[in-house]
Image (cartoon, coloured by chain):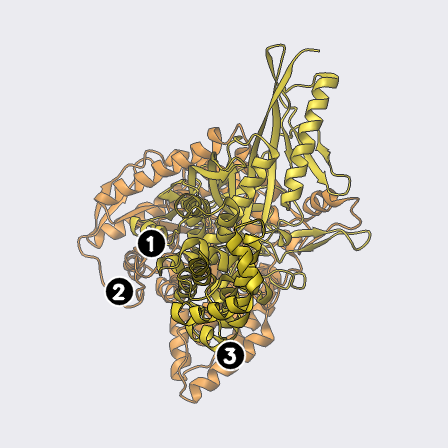
């Protein structure tokens, strides 16, 4: 059999719900899980005579996200109508952006397993309104819920730069982390805040000839798992089709497929690409949007250090593990809390340990962020410094952090109150050591003999001192005294 | 009881010389007598109108403050949404539609204490030049019941001409206020695009539609403008007060415009009936006598206006009317096989012939492959026509021309020849494409004793000047005082 190699090409179309208070073109509240059609008004129902009015916040969110995606921002952008008939589309056209999107030509860095990053091109990101939902569970008819109709959506289209299901997942997760950092979307997959449509095909090299498989577009995926699984499935399916019947890309044999979560397979929806005619034309009910230099500057000032940059910085500057850096940067509040604690003098690794081992656990239990636990970054920094200086043990620090959250006192106060201050007074400790040595001749002999048991005996003596001081002795100082006395 | 103008009536009601109840009852008496023959109204609200009149009279008697139109019976074209009664657009598809909100202009009329008499007939969805396209009833011309009232605001103009109300609102997409005003011998103003809120006006061609007053005198027109103009935050295409401040159109109405320069377009009249030409020439003479300087201006792209209009208006209409699909409100076909049939059959049954024709035309013009050739080309023509006006208005303050090439034609005369019908709007369409204001005022009669209208056009947002120029003519002539002989 001849040598066969293949390369996977995936591009993504992503829809992100923006977390504005109200809908894209009317004043209806955005809320999830309400009674059907209880969050609607004449405007989002598309009633006769109504007119849309743009939500400025949604526009600013979209520009902010586009800036984070390194896109060029258009100074002049307009709205277009995209016409198609569907029961959940009240006006039977969607207000979207066609030839003058608000942004284009950007990129996003995604983390690879190797620890490096990869740059994925962003073709464009534009704003549009979401449609409603058709419900088919009731019987011999369908119902339409228009609560979601008019929700602001950011549509992001990537270049086909991803070469594996894992890369696609990495991009999706990175994007989720990014929009949450920016505060422009809750990006809750379960609530359908992020939906993915990957375009997948393969470039196969066989007998030193290149073949491309037909592109399959997988519609409406709303979990990372489905996204990854469906692409893996699709790669296998396309490879099989090529090997079995030699199917390759031709004009019009692009297909649309759905994902069956139970069978874990993609299912054909439309064999051939339909020539959709959306009859786009400029939306006459909305005025074009002109973005001034001042507005752009204002939006730019709301940008923050992006998660992936932060993560890399933690690894490179603070020598944290990739795992720890990932945990600290999963949410913006955690990373910023960490940064402030480090700025206040906390040693990064210590601060990281305190946060990841205790802080996040407590925050999780309370269902809040680390920043909302009631402790201040400089308090955490002080606690880390106390460990660093040997004032308290690492274990004691964890206990104190727990108490700080509960009682809200300073770490010093708590350390004293809980008798967790380590004794480092050499004079005082020397007396105790002498007492222990006097009480344990055998162990002393073992240490002095320098034989096999020496190490163990030394540990035993240290333990005795710790016991006598109820754990408050600084073990480092005690060890030093013991070695000095017995050498 | 008889009166000349809405303003006069209002003043008499205010001083107690007459009462709103008296006036309103007189109007309903006329409606009882003449409406069966004229057919101006789709619905009337006798009880609520009398109640409102009584309330106004009481408030005046108590010395309370009342609005600018207090007690004056007015009518509304039935393509403006009202929470009372139905909003049918003279279409079977909306025959039973009860709007859940008022159009902004309706709210403004109510706030000005007008007495709303009823909602008037129109060409279905305002598409037509004779009101013969109404799916609900026939309106005739009060000057000759064998003739059309013009369109599409034929119901409103017939009602004003026949004394079935004192003033009315119409809408003008390509001449739908001015042309029927001319046919019925009343005053009709299409304001600058953006001067009056379109919120609640059931859209036909969104970038061209504008609501305007239909009255018996220029003064009444100014009074109505005072009530309905202004920025509306629900309509982002309505112009903000900071760009064009509101003004009182009545205040300086009678101030002459010194050194007035009026433009006429040579060769433009030649397509008109000789009686129309004669009346226009007479009007020019009046202005000359008033000391105006008549100059010739060029409108080189005028000939392309109709073609551009029928592409742009129908393109927008095809999209605006997509929402009438039998899914959310309005007519739905009985026993559809599937959801495609809900759409196709509901629309086939609900829309009339002319509406279907325009939807097809607009859909075609926007289809991929034809967009550039038709829609985009039409937009370019629109820009050229705008340029024609800009250039012309550098040399003069107003342009005079006929409103329509003919006076009111016979019912049924043009229904089978849509292109001939479309030519009725040949003089009015350019103003909609350019967005400039235009008025029709009575300027004579033809040999059949049918009124002829004079069209005056001025630069955008100069309605105050337009009304003054119109008033100068009105003050010198008696045409507006003539009334049709109705039994």
Other residues around mark 3 within 10 Å, as few (<14) / some (14–19) / many (≥20):
many
Q: Are marks 3 and 1 in contact (CB under 8 Å)?
A: no
Q: Nearer the viewer, residue B16 or A197?
A: A197
Which tint was used for chain B?
Answer: orange
Secondary structure of residue under mark 1? helix
As displayed, is residue A124 above or below residue A407?
above
Secondary element under disc 2, as helix, strand or loop, is loop
Label placed on residue B254: 2
What residue is rendered at 28% in x and 42% in y? B390
Please indicate, yes or no, whether residue A54 appears anywhere in the rendered image: no
N-terminal label among 3 and 2:
3
Q: Are marks 3 and 1 on the same chain?
A: no
- Please provide percent x and percent y for residue A264: 74, 39
Badge 1 vs badge 2, beta-carbon distance below 8 Å: no
Real-space CA distance between mark 1 and mark 2, rounded to the nearest whole angstrom = 50 Å
Chain A: its colour in the image is yellow
Chain bearing tag 2 is B
Q: Which residue is mark 1?
A: A298
Residue lying furthest bottom in this view?
Answer: B62
Report how far apart the C-alphas of labels 3 and 2 lie in the structure: 30 Å
SS class, disc 3: helix
């Amino acid at each position: 059999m001849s040598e066969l190699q293949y390369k996977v090409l995936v591009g993504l179309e992503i829809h992100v719900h923006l977390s504005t208070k109200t809908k894209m073109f009317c004043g209806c509240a955005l809320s999830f899980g309400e009674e059907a059609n209880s969050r609607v008004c004449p405007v989002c129902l598309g009633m006769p005579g109504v007119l849309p009015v743009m939500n400025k916040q949604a526009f600013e969110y979209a520009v902010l996200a586009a800036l984070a995606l390194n896109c060029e921002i258009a100074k002049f952008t307009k709205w277009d109508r995209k016409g198609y008939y569907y029961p959940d589309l009240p006006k039977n056209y969607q207000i979207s952006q066609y030839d003058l999107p608000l942004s284009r030509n950007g990129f996003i860095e995604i983390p690879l397993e190797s620890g490096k990053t990869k740059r994925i091109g962003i073709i464009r990101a534009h704003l549009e309104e979401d449609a409603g939902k058709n419900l088919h569970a009731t019987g011999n008819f369908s119902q339409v819920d228009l609560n979601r109709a008019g929700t602001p959506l950011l549509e992001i289209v990537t270049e086909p730069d991803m070469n594996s299901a894992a890369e696609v997942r990495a991009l999706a997760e990175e994007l989720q982390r990014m929009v949450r950092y920016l505060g422009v979307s809750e990006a809750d997959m379960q609530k359908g805040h992020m939906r993915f449509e990957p375009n997948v095909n393969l470039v196969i090299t066989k007998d030193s000839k290149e073949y491309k498989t037909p592109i399959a577009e997988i519609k409406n995926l709303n979990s990372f798992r489905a996204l990854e699984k469906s692409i893996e499935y699709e790669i296998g399916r396309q490879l099989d089709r090529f090997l079995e019947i030699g199917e390759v890309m031709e004009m019009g044999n692009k297909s649309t497929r759905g994902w069956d979560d139970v069978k874990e397979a993609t299912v054909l929806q439309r064999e051939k690409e339909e020539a959709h005619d959306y009859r786009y034309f400029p939306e006459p009910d909305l005025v074009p949007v002109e973005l001034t230099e001042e507005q752009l500057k204002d939006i730019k000032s709301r940008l923050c250090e992006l998660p992936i940059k932060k993560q890399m910085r933690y690894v490179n500057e603070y020598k944290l593990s990739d795992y720890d850096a990932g945990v600290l940067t999963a949410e913006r509040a955690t990373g910023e809390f960490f940064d402030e604690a480090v700025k206040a003098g906390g040693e990064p690794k210590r601060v990281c340990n305190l946060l990841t081992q205790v802080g996040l656990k407590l925050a999780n239990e309370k269902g809040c962020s680390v920043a909302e636990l009631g402790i201040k970054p400089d308090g955490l920094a002080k606690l880390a410094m106390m460990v660093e200086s040997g004032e308290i043990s690492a274990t004691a620090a964890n206990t104190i952090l727990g108490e700080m959250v509960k009682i809200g006192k300073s770490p010093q106060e708590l350390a004293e109150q809980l008798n967790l201050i380590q004794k480092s007074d050499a004079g005082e400790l020397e007396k105790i050591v002498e007492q222990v040595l006097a009480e344990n001749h055998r162990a002393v002999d073992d240490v002095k003999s320098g034989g096999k048991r020496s190490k163990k005996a030394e540990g035993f003596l240290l333990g005795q001192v710790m016991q006598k001081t109820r754990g408050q002795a600084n073990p480092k100082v005690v060890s030093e005294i013991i070695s000095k006395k017995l050498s | 009881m008889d009166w000349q103008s809405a303003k006069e009536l209002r003043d008499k009601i205010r001083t107690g010389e007459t009462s709103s109840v008296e006036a309103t009852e007189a109007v309903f008496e006329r409606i009882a007598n003449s409406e069966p023959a004229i057919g101006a109204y789709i619905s009337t609200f006798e009880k609520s109108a009398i109640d409102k009149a009584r309330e106004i009279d009481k408030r005046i008697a108590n010395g309370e403050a009342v609005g600018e139109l207090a007690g004056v019976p007015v009518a509304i074209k039935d393509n403006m949404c009202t929470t009372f009664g139905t909003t049918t657009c003279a279409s079977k598809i909306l025959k039973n539609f009860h709007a859940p909100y008022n159009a902004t202009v309706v709210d403004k009329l109510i706030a000005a204490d007008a007495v709303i008499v009823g909602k008037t007939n129109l060409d279905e969805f305002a598409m037509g030049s004779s009101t013969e396209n109404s799916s609900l009833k026939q309106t005739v011309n009060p000057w000759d019941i064998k003739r059309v009232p013009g369109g599409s605001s034929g119901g409103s103009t017939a009602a004003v001409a026949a004394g079935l109300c004192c003033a009315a609102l119409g809408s003008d997409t390509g001449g739908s206020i001015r042309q029927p005003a001319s046919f019925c011998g009343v005053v009709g103003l299409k304001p600058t695009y953006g001067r009056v809120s379109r919120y609640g006006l059931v859209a036909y061609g969104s970038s061209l539609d504008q609501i305007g007053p239909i009255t018996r005198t220029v003064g009444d027109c100014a009074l109505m403008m005072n009530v309905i103009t202004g920025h509306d935050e629900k309509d982002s295409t309505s112009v903000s007060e900071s760009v064009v401040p509101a003004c009182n159109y009545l205040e300086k109405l009678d101030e002459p415009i010194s050194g007035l320069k009026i433009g006429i377009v040579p060769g433009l009249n030649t397509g008109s009936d000789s009686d129309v030409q004669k009346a226009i020439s007479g009007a020019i003479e009046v202005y000359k006598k008033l000391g105006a300087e008549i100059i010739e201006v060029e409108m080189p792209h005028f000939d392309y206006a109709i073609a551009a209009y029928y592409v742009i208006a129908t393109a927008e209409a095809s999209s605006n009317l997509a929402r009438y699909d039998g899914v959310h409100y309005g007519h739905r076909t009985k026993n559809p096989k599937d959801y495609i049939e809900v759409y196709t059959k509901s629309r086939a049954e609900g829309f009339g012939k002319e509406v279907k024709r325009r939807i097809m035309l607009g859909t075609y013009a926007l289809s991929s492959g034809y967009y550039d050739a038709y829609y985009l080309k039409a937009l370019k023509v629109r820009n050229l026509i705008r340029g024609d006006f800009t250039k012309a208005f550098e040399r003069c303050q107003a342009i005079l021309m006929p409103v329509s090439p003919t006076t009111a034609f016979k019912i049924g005369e043009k229904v089978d020849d849509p292109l001939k019908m479309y030519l009725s709007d040949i003089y009015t369409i350019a103003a909609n494409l350019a967005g400039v204001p235009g008025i029709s005022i009575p300027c004579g009669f033809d040999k059949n004793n049918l009124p002829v209208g004079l069209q005056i056009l001025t630069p955008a947002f100069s309605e105050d000047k337009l009304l003054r120029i119109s008033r100068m003519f009105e003050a010198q002539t008696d045409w507006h005082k003539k009334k049709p002989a109705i039994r």
